[in-house]
Image (cartoon, rainbow, N blue to C red):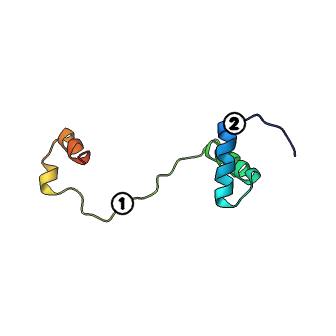
Amino acid sequence: MKTTIDLPDALFNAAKRFAAARGITLREVIEQSLARTLRENAPGHVFKLRDASVGGRGLTDAARALSSSALGDLANER
C-alpha cells in the first residue's frame, strides 16, 4: 500500500543517513521502526531486561558497610 506522510526535515535526513550507513532503504528503516513500535506497544507486551550480570560476588564487606548514599557517591566518582 502506498501512502504519504509528512516528516520534519531533520528526522527525514537522519533516517536517510541511518539507512545509507547500513546499506538499506529508507522504506526498510520505516517498516522496521513501525513494526518494532507496534510490537513493543501491543497489549500484553512485557519489557524484559537483558541479564547484564558480570559474574561477580556482590558487594565487598567494606562496601556492604557503607550507606546507600555513600555507595551512590562511590559509584559516581570519576
Which residue matches tag 2?
A: 9
Residue 32 screen position, x and y as percent: 69, 52
Q: Is residue 4 above or below residue 35?
A: above
Find residue 10 and name its label: none
Q: Nearer the viewer, residue 63 or 20?
A: 20
**Pointer 1: residues within 10 angstroms few (<14), some, or many (20+)?**
few
In the rendered image, residue 8, in percent from the top left (x then y), is placed at 69, 34
Q: Residue at x 70, y 41 (%)?
A: 12
What residue is shown at x 34% (from left), y 63% (from top)?
A: 54
Kind of residue indicated by mark 1 = Ser
Local secondary structure at mark 2: helix
Q: Which residue is mark 1?
A: 53
Q: Earlier in the sequence, mark 1 or mark 2?
A: 2
What percent of the width, then of the height, locates residue 77? Answer: 23, 46
Image: 37 above or below 50: above
Work out which residue is located at the far right of the displayed protein and give it.
1
Give the side of residue 6 with respect to residue 36, left or right.
right
